[in-house]
Image (cartoon, rainbow, N blue to C red):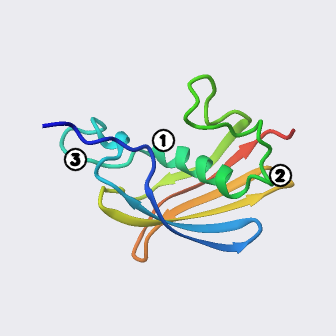
C-alpha cells in the first residue's frame, strides 16, 4: 500500500478581504499535512512554528504589494528561509490545539509603515493562536 502524498499547507476554502491591509482566510487542515507526522506520537496537532510559517506565507500571498519580495521569500526554496527580512516576534500566544480535519480562520493585518504583521488563528468557538511579526524595511 502506497503512502499518501503529504502537503505543506491547509486547503484554502475561502478568502474575505476586509480592506487593502486585512484579510480573513478560511482554511481546512488535512490529515495528510506533513507537519503532523511525528510532531507528537500520541496525538496529531499543528505545531506553533507551522502556524507562524503559514501566517508569513499567506501574508506574502495576500499582501504582495505591501511586503517587498526580498523580505519574504518562497517558503519552498531550499536556499532561503520563509523569514528573510524577519526582525522580531511579539506577544505570540498559543491558546488551543489545532487538530487535523478542522476548519479554522486566519486573520492577517499588515501595517505597511511599521512592517508589522498581526495574525490570529481562530474558529467560531475559540482562538488558537495570535501574535505580531515585524519585518525589516527595504
Residue for badge 2: 114
Q: Going by the image, does 105 lie left or right of 84?
A: left
CA separation in Å, label 2 and label 3 = 38 Å
Residue for badge 3: 43
Relative vertical location of residue 65 with respect to residue 27 in this rendering, above or below: above
Q: Going by the image, does 134 lie left or right of 82?
A: right
Q: Position of residue 56 (x, y in %)?
A: 62, 47
CA separation in Å, label 1 and label 2 = 23 Å
Crowd band around label 3 with a 10 angstrom C-alpha radius: few (<14), some (14–19), many (20+): few
Q: Residue at x 67, y 49 (%)?
A: 60
Mark 1 or 2, nearer chain start = 1
Q: Which residue is the extreme one toward the left?
A: 1
Residue for badge 1: 49
Q: Secondary structure at mark 3?
A: loop
Relative to the observer, which residue lies in front, 81 or 3? 3
Image quadrant in which you'd find residue 131 = bottom right
User: Do the numbered discs 2 and 3 sit on residues whose CB atoms are within 8 Å?
Assistant: no
Relative vertical location of residue 7 with respect to residue 25 in this rendering, above or below: above
Q: Secondary structure at mark 1?
A: helix
Q: Secondary structure at mark 2?
A: loop
Q: Residue at x 74, y 35 (%)?
A: 85
Which quadrant holds the C terminus? Answer: top right
Q: Position of residue 108 (x, y in %)?
A: 63, 61
Which quadrant holds the N terminus? Answer: top left
User: Do the numbered discs 1 and 2 sit on residues whose CB atoms are within 8 Å?
Assistant: no
Amino acid at each position: 500500500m502506497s503512502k499518501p502524498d503529504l502537503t505543506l499547507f491547509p486547503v484554502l476554502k475561502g478568502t474575505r478581504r476586509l480592506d487593502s491591509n486585512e484579510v480573513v482566510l478560511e482554511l481546512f487542515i488535512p490529515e495528510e499535512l506533513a507537519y503532523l507526522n511525528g510532531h507528537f506520537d500520541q496525538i496529531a496537532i499543528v505545531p506553533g512554528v507551522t502556524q507562524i510559517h503559514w501566517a508569513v506565507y499567506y501574508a506574502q500571498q495576500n499582501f504582495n504589494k505591501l511586503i517587498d519580495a526580498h523580505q519574504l521569500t518562497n517558503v519552498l526554496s531550499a536556499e532561503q528561509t520563509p523569514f528573510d527580512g524577519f526582525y522580531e516576534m511579539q506577544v505570540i500566544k498559543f491558546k488551543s490545539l489545532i487538530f487535523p480535519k478542522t476548519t479554522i480562520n486566519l486573520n492577517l493585518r499588515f501595517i505597511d509603515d511599521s512592517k508589522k504583521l498581526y495574525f490570529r488563528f481562530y474558529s467560531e468557538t475559540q482562538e488558537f493562536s495570535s501574535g505580531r511579526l515585524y519585518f525589516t524595511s527595504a
